[in-house]
Image (cartoon, helix red, strand yellow):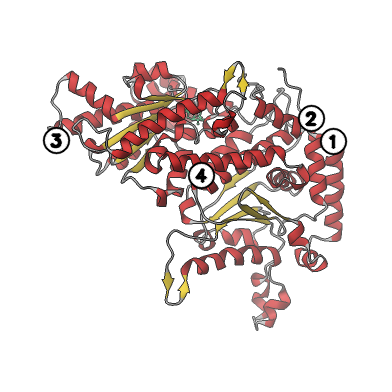
Amino acid sequence: MAINPPVDATKTPAWSALQQHFNDLQNEGIDLRAWFAQDPERTSKLSFEAGDLHFDLSKNLIKPETLDLFAQLAKDVKLDERIKQMYGGVHINNTEDRAVLHTALRRPVEDEGKYIVDGQDVVKDVRETLDRIYAFAEKVRSGEWTGVTGKKIETVVNIGIGGSDLGPVMAYEALKPYADAGISARYISNIDPNDLAEKTKGLDPETTLFIIVSKTFTTLETLTNAREAKAWLLEELRSQHAIDESDEKSAEAIKKHFIAVSTALDKVEAFGIDPQNAFGFWNWVGGRYSVESAVGTSLVIVFGPARFEEFLHGFHEIDEYFATTPFEKNVVALLGLMNVWYVNFFGAHSHAVLPYDQYLHRFAAYLQQLTMESNGKSVRWDGTPVTTQTGEIFWGEPGTNGQHAFYQLIHQGTRLIPADFIAFANTPNPVKDGDQDVHELFLANYFAQTKALAFGKTAEEVRAEGTAEAIVPARVFTGNRPTTSILGEALTPFALGELIALYEHITFVEGTVWGLDSYDQWGVELGKVLAKQITPAISQDDEALAQQDQSTQGLINFYRSHRL
Ligand code: F6P
């Protein structure tokens, strides 16, 4: 089915209404203190539940009526039609002529037979693959699957990059308390040899299982690291006399210690991995939307199939909510629309994501690929230029660490930085410091920060503390710095699935307003091609060097003359 050209959001009635509303708010004066004082129900009007997550939008630069304008914008850009197209398998990734069906990866078994896309029973295929992964993972977890010398696997090493790394490593770190089979994971992504060198340190080759994860199975970094890992494994096993030098034993070792995940299973076999030990997925799963596909095999092994199912249920909960809740009340859509509000009306350049949970310490890195590879674009899905700014920079670190680093800029800098604060009511590590529950001490910071950012501190309040007049200005907090608070009961596999789906759909909503194909990534190609061209110029080929531009020549000459 052909897709319509994007609606130019900036030409819609809702956009004009939002512009008028923005002007009105500026004229009235944006003042969260006053807005809260005027409306005792502001928080309840601007709070939402989705799945088991609670959202408080009241400390944002919006009024309750702003939400109606957001919803109108969603309607004007035909977000509902685009959601139907995405969930229905229309090729909305039109520059690659692909469906975008990550939501099908988390559909329940009951949807088998009900969901046929391009003649394919998508859910059936998904479940069949999951069943194979689950069966394999159970063997590894129970010790039925062993390394070549008969020892139980204790470490899985995921080799992949981008979407084949960031999702799994983020989720592994997030869910560590749920690891229950005595198996840990490591993640190698960078082609910088330092990554593999450090991640293989102290590893026992006899108890290590490598998972080579690459959607295309052509990615330079992953294939290079996979070859290095093969060499490492054989060398270590031989040097420990765990295997002899024969080709048969090497092949057996590779078979027992290497599995693969890819959409290109023919390439997996050519690489020397037994196709029996390979798990597929489909080209309608974008790399950065793939953690809940076979790409998450390391997670299934470490946490087990039951936990992985909970993870999938969390995604599905938000998928259903997003697709069925009217936009006026649909917090997932509203958060995407509010991001547009900040980027296009307030001129925000970036968006901070600040989890108050150390287990989410890779969440911002994961979100960077999700959001910026999706919406960092200057042309729309019909090839025409965008009509407004797109793609804010997502960044962040867990609190409270960030408080002692970059929060200064959020509190008192000149830039407006909308921020999402994420926290959970319970911790798997309850600790007391004397009588003080440390998790509560931690959460006090979570609550305090959004309060400080919203309401600030006036010069009068600073003076009232006896501050010397000369330093009063430096100690004033203007307030009116927007934040969204997201709270859950606990960081479970279910909650993590919800959070990921939330940001996937936020990204989709923003992309739809801006008219983007959020599912291609042509912007990463040129650098890959040039790296290939430059490789021969680096060490020996003077002719190749002469073909480079003067800056690149200068840099390579410096490299050549300094290489020891
Ligand atoms: O270079 C970007 C990219 O294509 C990402 O979109 C993708 O997640 C990553 O590379 C890894 O690709 P693959 O899984 O095919 O190795």
| Mark with earlier residue (3, 4) | 3
360 relative position to 55: left or right: left
| Mark with earlier residue (1, 2) | 2
User: Which residue lies under the disc numbered 3?
Assistant: 240
Residue 239: assigned label: none
Q: Do the residues labelled 1 and 2 touch (CB within 8 Å)?
A: yes
Residue projecting furthest to the front? 110
Element at label 1: loop
User: Label 1 crowding class (10 Å Cα cut-off): few <14, some 14-19, many 20+?
Assistant: some
Taking 418 as reference, is 170 above or below it? above
| Mark with earlier residue (2, 4) | 2
User: Which residue lies under the disc numbered 1?
Assistant: 12
Taking 451 as reference, is 498 above or below it? above
What is the C-alpha distance between the residues marked 1 and 2? 8 Å
Mark 4: which amino acid?
A: Ala
User: Which residue lies under the disc numbered 2?
Assistant: 7
